[in-house]
Image (tube, helix red, strand yellow):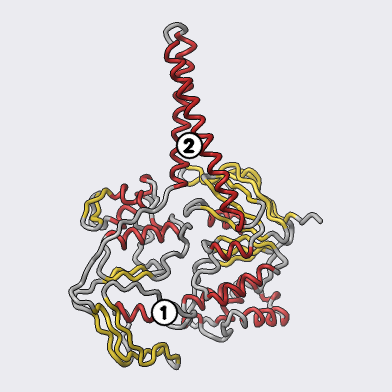
Amino acid sequence: MVSQVLLSVQNAVISFGGKPLFENLTFHILEGDKTCLVGKNGSGKSTLMNVIRGLRDLDEGKLWQLEGITIGYLRQDVVVKPEQTVKDYILEDLKKENQSEAFTYRMEMVAEPLQIGLSDLMENLSGGQKRRAALARALVEDPDILLLDEPTNHLDLEIIIWLENYLKSYRGAVLCVSHDRTFLANISDKVFWLDRGRLLVCPRGYKFFDEWSTGLIEQEERELHNREKMLEVEVAWASRGVRARRKRNVRRLALMKETREKLRQDKSAFLRMMAKIEIEGTEVEVSSKIVAEFIKVDKSFGSKVILDKFSLRIMRGDRIGVLGKNGSGKSTFLKLLVGELQPDMGKVKINKDLEFSYFDQARKELDPEASLWSTLCPSGGDHIEVMGKSRHVCGYLKDFLFDPEMARHSVKTLSGGQKNRLLLAKVLADPKSFLILDEPTNDLDM
């Protein structure tokens, strides 16, 4: 049985500042599809989501959707109003006439496995708990097309497994952006790959994506090599005969110049696609072997106990992973460590020589209005000190996969993954003696 087309995009073109982001993009979303949308940071995944949601018009091309279908969306950022309960948050965008008893029952059925209380205040929830509330908000409407933007960020493994099972049996279509490879492999039966303005379709799930995409990349590499060899032969032949048949060969050499420039652009784009972040390592020492110590620390919020007579000694050279369920106190522990919070009882002792570099998952250190350049060089100039060495800001940005022309772009124009890369660049330029990373891999490429 052929599945019904719910939404179709034909020959789409979208540009930013005169530079095409997509060209001649065509795809279809069918009833029951479980599709993952992959691509490097800044390739346009969020933009494409906004096109499907009707929040971004195409510069060229056509978008069609089946009359009467509904589209649900799990957003990355959760905006909370004062005194707003989880129930109020879920119902916020729902029309009054749709808030039936059946809907209330469905809301309770979704909230229970997500382990959120409908009467809880949103402002009192941890980042992971807020994420669950946002997930409930997207799921309870039971939309025909469900768009998920990084659904596993901040979620416990238990909740991720529940979500996988829920989506496998979901009757509607799912389009998911995620950097969680295992999650994508478990839920998808199709892959949309955004690559250099193109959308390529892998007709099988993410389990087969690496093999499929590697084959395409190797084929492209061979074609680039063959084009280069053919061009060398053509140039050598034309150069020898240019005097004998001047007019014809001058035209031919001009055409070859254009061909060489196109080859150079294609090779440059291919190398950018294959590039990886380069991070230099360094050792920063403090005078004592003990760098921090928690001594019988108590910390509560209202009646909720986070830490009870908690003791811990952190030694120089330790590499510590902080694990725990949403709301168990991971962020509270880190804030106690850096001094943003004080214990109710007990003591947190910090070595006098200790300095912190803190990568905050909320990215509060990034000014949305600032440029990438001024973010790394807030005092002006065009060089930045990176681990004691002077680097040109554009060269340092290239280490984190930013093209030089992006240096003057504002932070607010970046995707979530690009913002994370910029914050990593800022933090790692001058690493202190204690590096704290709070969800550093969220939104980052594989």
> Residue at the spot x=49%, y=68% of the render?
77
Left or right for 405, reference 38: left
Q: Mark 2 vs mark 1: which is more N-terminal?
A: 2
Question: On the rendered structure, is 439 left or right of 354?
Answer: right
The type of residue carrying mark 1 is: Lys
Q: Marks 2 and 1, how far apart in space?
A: 46 Å
The image quarter containing residue 439 is: bottom left
Q: Residue furthest top?
A: 244
Say which residue appears at 60% left-offset and 73% top-offset.
Answer: 161
Residue 285 against residue 205 in the figure, above or below: below
- Is disc 2 placed on a helix, strand or loop? helix
| Residue 219 % position (x, y) | 56, 39
Which residue is under mark 1? 330
Q: Nearer the viewer, residue 166 or 365?
A: 166
User: Would you name the residue on which mark 2 appears?
Assistant: 266
Q: Quadrant of the N terminus?
A: bottom right
Q: Decide: marks 2, 1 in contact (CB < 8 A)?
A: no
Name the element at disc 1.
helix
Answer above or below: position of 258 versus 55: above
Q: Nearer the viewer, residue 61 or 275?
A: 275
Q: Nearer the viewer, residue 118 or 241?
A: 241
